[in-house]
Image (tube, rainbow, N blue to C red):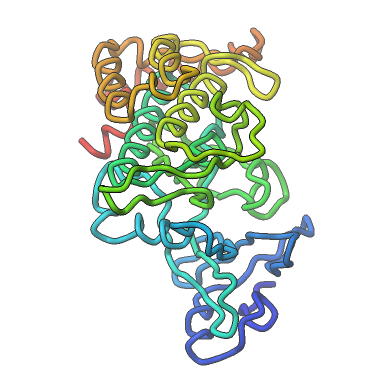
Amino acid sequence: MARQLRMASFMWLPASPAIEAKLGAFVDIQSSAGANDGLFERGLYWWTYATRISDGKVVILKRIEKNELVSGTETEIACYVSLSALQDEPDNHSVRVLEVLRKPSDESFEVLVMPLLRPFDSPRFETVGEGVDFFLQAFKGLQFLHRHRIAHRDSTGPNIMMDCELFPDGWHPKKPHMNREYTGPAKPVYTRTQKPPRYLWIDFGLSAHFRDPNNPPVYLPAHGTDKTAPEFQEEMENPSSYDPFPTDIYYLGNLVRTYFLDANKKRPGISGFEFMRPLMQDMIKDDPKERPDINECVARLDDIVSSLPTWKLRTQVVYSTDNIFGYILRFIPYIFRLFTYALLDVPAIPSRQVTG
């Protein structure tokens, strides 16, 4: 049964009219799976979830430990890209902060309230055009950050998620493969072409904001999700500062390689995206100075996309782990949808039916 969240039991925040007014908009979720019911425990849980009473939508609450050594804290950067003026920019693909909760007597942490998102690669892509849509949004979202002199410093697969309507019945916040009630698997009803998702960069915990354009963008190395960046392979007892923007390019290029082009131990390769390989190879060059900057990456991607015919974008992708039986089962509804899309003139790159 849902209950009103209380600051004393939820995040060690004292009950007060102002605090209660903020938290009064939320109730927490109980799950039959016995998942954590919303209590943050130091060192164990750094995020939980709640339901917003006003519209019934699930939101994520993330505890942020403040660090005075960081020039731009996660909260500062997340709130900056959430400014109304910046949210109106079409290439701002950054998660939006809905609210910031703070404990007046303890400034060591704060809590960000954000929308519930889903891993960008779940469910699977159906067509080449759906994958291209992801590339465009991911690249232009990183371009937006770099234009505002924000280096993500962990621009990897787990840190780009999607805001989507593919699952009308929702999914469990902590177990996305399960439905919201945790009584069975979450089942997508729509494809990405039918309900175009929006891909968003998240987690600015390692990010840096170089506000002064007169100062060079240098920072101490940070080892995020992807441990393969060539510039971080040597052991450094006294690590030297580096320019994080080319490393962002490496991470994004390696995302394209490991999630789409090349099969590996963690995930299958996907057919149909070989046109991305030349750009990807330049993005992951060993020498950071030889990598293209994000503006060149976006320009080259736009040229690539412009060269792809509609039939290519409509092509069904095949995962390296697919068997013939599963392929046939997916091919039949795909063919039906293909004719429907052609009849209704649905764009082969999904987001273009939203943005025009």
Q: Looking at the image, is 115 positioned above or below residue 101?
A: above
Q: Quadrant of the C terminus?
A: top left
Between 253 and 48, the residue placed more toward the observer is 253
Find residue 13 and report its horizontal and vertical position in percent. Answer: 61, 82
Residue at the front extreme, as displayed: 238
Q: Residue furthest right?
A: 34
Q: Is residue 27 left or right of residue 91?
A: right
- Residue drawn 70% across and 20% down? 265
Q: Is residue 286 left or right of residue 1?
A: left
Classify residue 299 by image quadrant. Answer: top left
**Outermost residue, left side:** 356
Image quadrant containing the N terminus? bottom right
In the rendered view, tell whether residue 121 sits above or below residue 126.
Answer: below
- Residue under the point 52% across and 80% down: 24
In the rendered view, would you say 167 is above or below 66?
above
Please say whether residue 164 is visible from this viewpoint.
no
Tell me where residue 137 appears, x and y as whole percent.
36, 34
Where residue 344 sits, quadrant-wise, is top left
Q: Position of residue 95 (x, y in %)?
A: 43, 51
Name the residue at 45% across, 72% down: 54
Residue at x 41%, y 39% (from the top left corner): 197
Count the marks. Answer: 0
Of residues 325 and 268, the one drawn nearer to the viewer in this rendering: 268
Image check: 339 left or right of 29?
A: left
Nearest the camera: 18 or 333? 18
Q: Is residue 335 visible from the viewing direction of this image?
A: yes
Residue 7: image location, x then y, percent: 62, 81
Residue 350 in which image quadrant: top left
